[in-house]
Image (spheres, grey):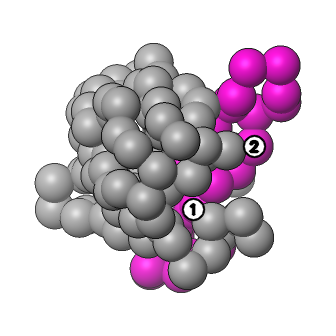
Amino acid sequence: QVQLVESGGGLVQAGGSLRLSCAASGSISSINTMAWYRQAPGKQRELVASITISGGTNYADSVKGRFTISRDNAKNTVYLQMNSLKSEDTAVYYCNVVRVLYFPTRTYDYWGQGTQVTVSS
């Protein structure tokens, strides 16, 4: 099992910044992709950004140029730097990690408990 502890959410004014952190512990070997998702009230959970173990990144169009995902493999931690926040960024943000084991290949998904980000206009 992998345990994920998120921190950094809160209330911020539009145009402001927040930095989310997610630390993984437990069976952390073979962690591959780390990502942030978000879910706003009445909406489906959506991918915000992801980063592979080699550093390849992917962003939702709505956050490109404003958010930056990074990871520290030595600390098993993923970060999400959020700048120029907008009211539509208000959501619960969830950390996600994927472990990949081989022979045979199988993947395991783990989720954090979520952290609230509220952007006031």
Residue 35 visible in the displayed image: no
User: Quick one: quadrant of the N terminus?
Assistant: top left
Q: Are marks 2 and 1 in contact (CB under 8 Å)?
A: no
Q: Is residue 1 above or below residue 21?
A: above
Identify the residue at image location x=83%, y=27%: 43
Q: Nearer the viewer, residue 6 or 28?
A: 6
Residue to which mark 1 is pinned: 50
Q: Can residue 80 be seen here?
A: yes
| Residue, far right | 43
Q: Secondary structure at mark 2?
A: strand
Q: Is residue 22 above or below residue 118?
A: below
**Secondary structure at numbered mark 1:** strand
The magenta stretch is 35-58
Closest to the observer: 81 or 36?
81
Q: Is 56 covered by the magenta stretch?
A: yes
* Distance (Cα) linking label 2 and label 1: 11 Å
Q: Is residue 3 above or below residue 30?
A: above
Q: Residue at x 27, y 37 (%)?
A: 8
Among all residues in the image, which is located at the extreme left?
75
Q: Is residue 3 left or right of residue 97?
A: left
The residue carrying mark 2 is 46
Mark 1: amino acid: Ser
